[in-house]
Amino acid sequence: MPASAGTDSQLAIERIYREEYGRVVASLVRRFGSIDIAEDAAAEALLAAVEKWPVDGVPPNPGGWLTTTAGNRAIDKLRRESHRDAKHQAALMIADDTPHEPTGPLEDERLRLIFTCCHPALAPEARVALTLRLIGGLTVAEIAQAFLVPETTMAQRITRAKKKISLAGIPYRVPEADDLAPRLSAVLAVVYLVFNEGYLTSTPDAPPVREELTAEAIRLGRILRKLLPDVPEVAGLLALMVLIEARRSTRVAGGELVPLDQQDRGGWDRALIDEGHALVRECLARRRPGQYQILAAINAVHTDARTAADTDWSQIAALYEQLRVITPSPFVELNRAVAVAELDGPEVALAIVDRLDLTAYHAWHATRADLLRRTGRSAEARAAYDAAIAATDNAAEIAYLTRRRDQLSG
């Protein structure tokens, strides 16, 4: 076999494994009640696939093959522990020859696993790590690299989280109807956190935009959308992410951040924009949209404008007004102020911004710097740019802010 064929085969196996990993692990957790057993068995199934598939070919249902193989390996391992008779008997009883299907009940198992990963008893950083590991199929090394922490640190974080799930008896199930909304909010927050870290990384020495993180967050969003097709906020989050992702290729140029009004709109991904707009229309057909749906609608207005000058700032301001009613926060007010500046002028917007307690937030300083620049207060604008530069670690953003500061007159 030529070397290139072997490489192609290996890449195909890795792609299939990552796509199927969440389903395989979720199925094994249901059967064996242990994340560790499920992960170990899934890893053994991958090794078997690497040995067999290049020779025998990829099976028609690769997910089913991986699930069956992993289940058999798990049972064999438990049987070998002959001194643990209870486990041996359990292994005999839970032998399950039900074929794996890409859709159906196993999708529900994956949903249960998502809620387990994002249980409020776990620390936020642990929720992110577990979700990427068990649902996204990323390796510990990949997750550690994504968040620029040592692999040993990330491994310990994931191990502690799995131990807490076991010791605290965190249930492997979708919450009851009364608990679903707040628990789903935590799940969506984890996915959006992953996306935001990729969209504009906060980590020093990292690339300004982390495509692998935005892509993984969107993939998780698509999984949730498929599992929960009738939940508007799930559609809203997916719409928000794809509309932002549609602009990714134009957001950085020459190592410098490019603001929305200066981006080359011809370089935006129209397929993603069309997908996002369709999801927004679906969301807005319902009553009382949630925060992700409103944020998606705001991004839909931006991406609907042929030029920056065509932007419907009145509609954007109205949407932010709606957002601050349901989720009041200084961050919402800061973004509303940007729309107000376009409608009523920078002085009015500056009065809003100066009332916000966000002095530790780089975007507050950056917004304030721009408004001060537009009002002709160059010395104050320069100081605000300096504060914004000091408050961010994103190289592209620093480059943009530095240029804007240096262009000030006086």
Image: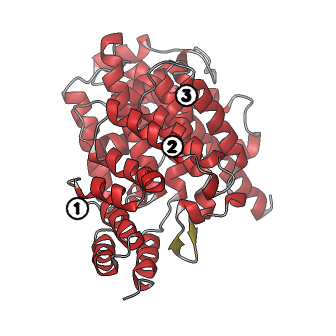
Residue 62 in percent (x, y) is at 67, 32
User: Counting other residues with Cα less than 10 Å from the Cα at mark 1, is it few (<14), some (14-19), or many (20 or more)?
Assistant: few
Question: For the residue labelled by badge 2, is the local secondary structure a helix, a strand or a loop?
Answer: helix
Residue at the (46%, 75%) spot, across then down: 400
Instruction: Calculate the distance from the C-alpha at mark 1 to the C-alpha at mark 3.
Output: 35 Å
Identify the image quadrant of the C terminus: bottom left
Provide the residue designation for mark 2: 314
Of labels 2 and 1, earlier in sequence is: 2
Indicate which label's residue lies in the foreground, 3 or 2. 2
Compared to residue 161, the image places residue 388 above or below, namely below
Residue 375 in percent (x, y) is at 38, 70
Amino acid on which the number 3 mark rests in the picture: Arg
Image-based side of 310 in relation to 191, left or right: right
Provide the residue designation for mark 3: 225
Provide the residue designation for mark 1: 360
Residue at the (32%, 20%) spot, across then down: 87
Image-based side of 109 in relation to 244, left or right: left
